[in-house]
Amino acid sequence: VSGHRNDPTLDPTLRSWVPVPEGSDFPIQNLPFGVFRCPGLRPRVGVAIGDHVLDLEAVMASGLFADLEVALPAGVFGSDSLNGLLALGRPAWRSVRRRVSELLRAGSSEILERTGPEGRVLARQAEVELLLPARIGDYVDFYSSIEHATNMGRLFRPDTEPLLPNWRRMPVGYHGRAGSIAVTGTPVVRPRGQWKEGGGGEPSWAPTRMLDVELEVGFITGPGSRQGGRISIDRAEQHIFGLVLVNDWSARDIQAFEYQPLGPFLGKSFATSISPWVVTLDALEPYRLPGPPQDPPAMGYLSTPEDWAFDIELAIELQSGAMANAGLSPMPISRANFRGLYWSIAQQLAHASSNGAVVRPGDLFASGTISGPAPGSFGSLIELTWRGANPISLPDGAMRTFLEDGDTVVLRGRCTGPGRAPIGFGECRGTVVPAPID
Amino acid sequence: VSGHRNDPTLDPTLRSWVPVPEGSDFPIQNLPFGVFRCPGLRPRVGVAIGDHVLDLEAVMASGLFADLEVALPAGVFGSDSLNGLLALGRPAWRSVRRRVSELLRAGSSEILERTGPEGRVLARQAEVELLLPARIGDYVDFYSSIEHATNMGRLFRPDTEPLLPNWRRMPVGYHGRAGSIAVTGTPVVRPRGQWKEGGGGEPSWAPTRMLDVELEVGFITGPGSRQGGRISIDRAEQHIFGLVLVNDWSARDIQAFEYQPLGPFLGKSFATSISPWVVTLDALEPYRLPGPPQDPPAMGYLSTPEDWAFDIELAIELQSGAMANAGLSPMPISRANFRGLYWSIAQQLAHASSNGAVVRPGDLFASGTISGPAPGSFGSLIELTWRGANPISLPDGAMRTFLEDGDTVVLRGRCTGPGRAPIGFGECRGTVVPAPID
């Protein structure tokens, strides 16, 4: 929790010459990376600052990245993904971050001097399209919250020990569908699938009646590894670029019928939403802390003396179509914290690559549903309502067990603490639209 | 089994002016697509003919594709993947195939007239590097052989019904790791992982002792679908470009400890090998036939009157390091046929997209291990040796239950039948190399 004290980009007293609204997720201490498109132009890489986005391609074209310690290849920011930057590795990431921080700092006039009117390098976020930040090669979803895994064991296998024997030995996970990952704001079409009414009888093929959310945080990888190599836990920091919010939409009825013995497939693969800005490990440095104790102790390949938990306050908000029509804002239905995650992101990466699997720049590894110990801190509707036993009351008078068409779900993440600049993740939002007529 | 009779590219009497050795997998009736690189040059798309590869980029540059019914975008063959071609769809694929067949037909001199010496458009396969044919976005692995699923149920859950209730209702599957897919010839590094000696006690983290193969056939997709859309089974033919051999290398001890409840992960994700040439549905048309009966009948979204089984003879060959040193060829250890697959590839694609999941050009969907009904036709070592009860004797005097370092496995696929030209898939080969010292 100390390394950040020497990093000038993290000084909580820093201010930017770009106006940053009070309470913004994106003060100058954050500087998350994303991909955006101005109307009619090609996509490019940018950094969020307040309500604006700084166009890194334009900054580079102006020669303002000429003196970095790490030379940047041409075109690295004139791209529809962060993958080129991700492949360069941590020294380059840090170099760019420090330079962007200098350029945006109150008092600096380099950008305005070099590029003329600020309109040439800064766009309002509201006026650009935010795109998927990375070309995601593989998507792994873990199951690393002990509270969530315990809840799911109790709900799905009530007669047995909720945690299976492997759970405390390794970060259990599986591969999801990378092609179905979409950026915040993309509508989510209610999936059809095979499920059994009440879990019994003959299956039917129909739109899911148990559409759920999963509150997750994922990390995006940097350089990666070759087949047969591995990323040791001590090298994880060189390979993790930053974090995003993830909503792993789930159809519980489809999942329940299909998942044995090969795991979740169509109950998950229809849609996964992520937030558009990748919040870097550098920006999160002030919010690192030790994770929960592990019993039994992690095996050698999963052990590290470093702090790999992150103090990130998370929330799920829900807004029905009727609430939206009545002008009612999304209502918080759960609050959790990422710091409670049993298996850290470094352990997840070390485990996933421990068998020599290939990791590429832009891979996404998500935490699995993050649930806290108390009922109001669970990360999915099936847990929050305890499979329907405790429905949620909405301000429009309606009740919810699972999602209805027209419902909007917003995930939020924010870091705050004394002596540190508060930063956030922006929104991960999606609205459910009806299944198409077959 | 009749549509092919009118397709001139499938006439079994056709011959090419390019010499095709007797018994070649690649006569003029096959024309599979792949990606190759001549030493020092950029990768490009080619078609296999006998022992040669026809450079489609050079053919296009010579203007010989100018009069196709479907116009081809510039650069579609000057690429390191088939993805550009895959996105164009079946009318374009068929158009290119017909033209290539004309150009290679005995008596045609268009290529030689237009391009001069044949060296400019034809290279010997032995002198080029064959690359992964597609940039594979997502990799799904099914479990569609009833014989294999039954064997695995008996081996892993001996006290229960071998097929779970969902198995006869849907093609059960899961997502594998796309980044770990490599083309034939790529060495396979023995993975480490957590496993328990004899299945009990404390787990250790060590190189697998149960390294296995899985004999599979996969299909590569064309245009694909958007989130919320789906590919109906009647449209499957428009979205399946062709087939490859797949070896889904598996570490049974790692898999056994990790796989519940989320399915296989590190026991599979370390390596998957595929053959380099994609054999098109058009070339396979003479070998289409009805699949096995399904009980209960498939639901509507999985029903089609079309024939979706393929008569492809498959083999697994094994060669130990000692055999290689003694000049002994790989020895066949299993022979199966793809026609017995319970769930067809059209059913697999319709199911995988039935929930609105995104399918992209170049996705790979593999069949799962193909086992026949008899012991000599099983598609994995764990089945062939019945978990070690019946080890395999090699000609060098050694025995095998699972793979040793230095072992080479070759998968082969071939179609033959009266009145039809025999065609094949080429090799899917891999040699096991030791786990690195930790």
Image: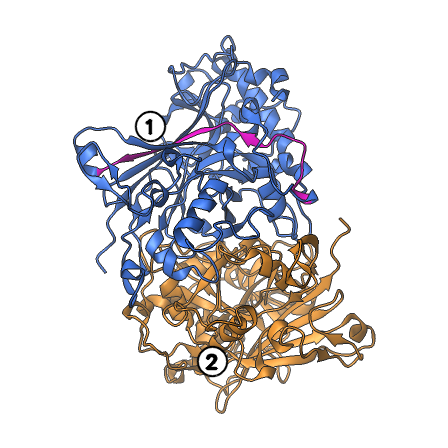
Chain colours: A orange, B blue
x, y percentage for residue B428? Answer: 38, 35
Residue A415 or residue A67, whichever sits in front? A415
x, y percentage for residue A216? Answer: 54, 70
x, y percentage for residue A105? Answer: 52, 79
Q: Residue at x 63, y 32 (%)?
A: B90
Task: Note whether B273 is above or below A70 in the view shown.
Answer: above
Q: Residue at x 56, y 21 (%)?
A: B286
Q: Which of the chains bears the disc numbered 2?
A: A
Neighbourhood count class around disc 1 (C-alpha, 10 Å): few under 14, some 14–19, many 20 upward? few
x, y percentage for residue B13? Answer: 51, 10
As drawn, the label of residue B127 is 1
Task: Note whether B47 is above or below B12 in the view shown.
Answer: below
Q: Secondary structure at mark 1?
A: helix
| Residue A206, quarter of the rendered image | bottom right
Q: Secondary structure at mark 2?
A: helix
Q: Residue at x 68, y 32 (%)?
A: B305
- Name which residue type carries label 2: Gly
Q: Which of the chains bears the disc numbered 1?
A: B
Task: Note whether B112 is above or below B56 in the view shown.
Answer: above
Neighbourhood count class around disc 2 (C-alpha, 10 Å): few under 14, some 14–19, many 20 upward? many
Question: Residue reaching furthest front?
Answer: B159
Q: Which segment did they paint magenta? A: B301-320
**Residue B121 appears in the rendering:** yes
Residue A190 or residue A22, whichever sits in front? A190
- Of labels 2 and 1, the one closer to you: 2
